[in-house]
Amino acid sequence: MAMTETTQRNRPESPEKESSTLIKRGGGAPATRGRTTIADGVVEKIAGMAARDVVGVHAMGSGLSRTFGAVRDRVPGGGRSVTRGVKAEVGESQTALDLEIVVDYGVSIADVARDVRENVVAAVERMTGLEVVEVNIAVSDVKLPDEAEDEGQSEPRLH
């Protein structure tokens, strides 16, 4: 019995004291403290820029949204809308994107769509850390070589 009494006396009085000295203030590594949220608009801007970089993409958005965008571009402070033709749904760790594009005449639409997907996924995942689960692409028009530019390049005439 003397052996048991000696062993018990050498143990710390309470297990709480021992474990409290092991826990550091602040709750872990600084990188793990808190949460980061990314707005839909941020992902839309990144995706819009990445899609526009692909050869064969003439414009983003439908004809109507491009017409309204051309008017907005002329208004001082209106600026170009990088998010035109892009819609994102952002969750905690994943995002899904819908893109509407106009392609140049003569390009392979399948190749352009593949290149847009690859560029958008790479840019969004690299910049946000979100997993891109899908990139849906709707080709709304094809720009013919002899078509006038419908994004407001020609000024309206005043009589």
Image (cartoon, rainbow, N blue to C red):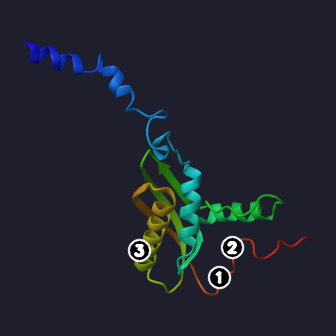
Q: Is residue 21 left or right of residue 90?
A: left
Name the residue type under label 1. Glu
Q: Can residue 138 be seen at all in this image of the molecule?
A: no
Q: Position of residue 145 (x, y in %)?
A: 61, 87
Q: Look at the numbered disc 3 and give the secondary structure of its residue.
A: helix
Could you tell me how far apart the alpha carbons at marks 1 and 3 are, in whole angstroms?
Answer: 26 Å
Q: Are marks 1 and 2 in contact (CB under 8 Å)?
A: yes
Q: Label 3 belongs to which residue?
A: 114
Could you tell me how far apart the alpha carbons at marks 3 and 2 are, in whole angstroms?
Answer: 26 Å
Among the two numbered marks 3 and 2 on one chain, the one whose residue lies closer to the N terminus? 3
Observer-nearest of 125 and 141: 125
Observer-nearest of 1 and 48: 1
Q: Residue at x 45, y 61 (%)?
A: 125
Compared with residue 13, is residue 140 higher up or lower down, i.e. above or below? Answer: below
Say the numbered circle drawn on residue 147.
1
Compared with residue 151, is residue 38 higher up or lower down, i.e. above or below? Answer: above
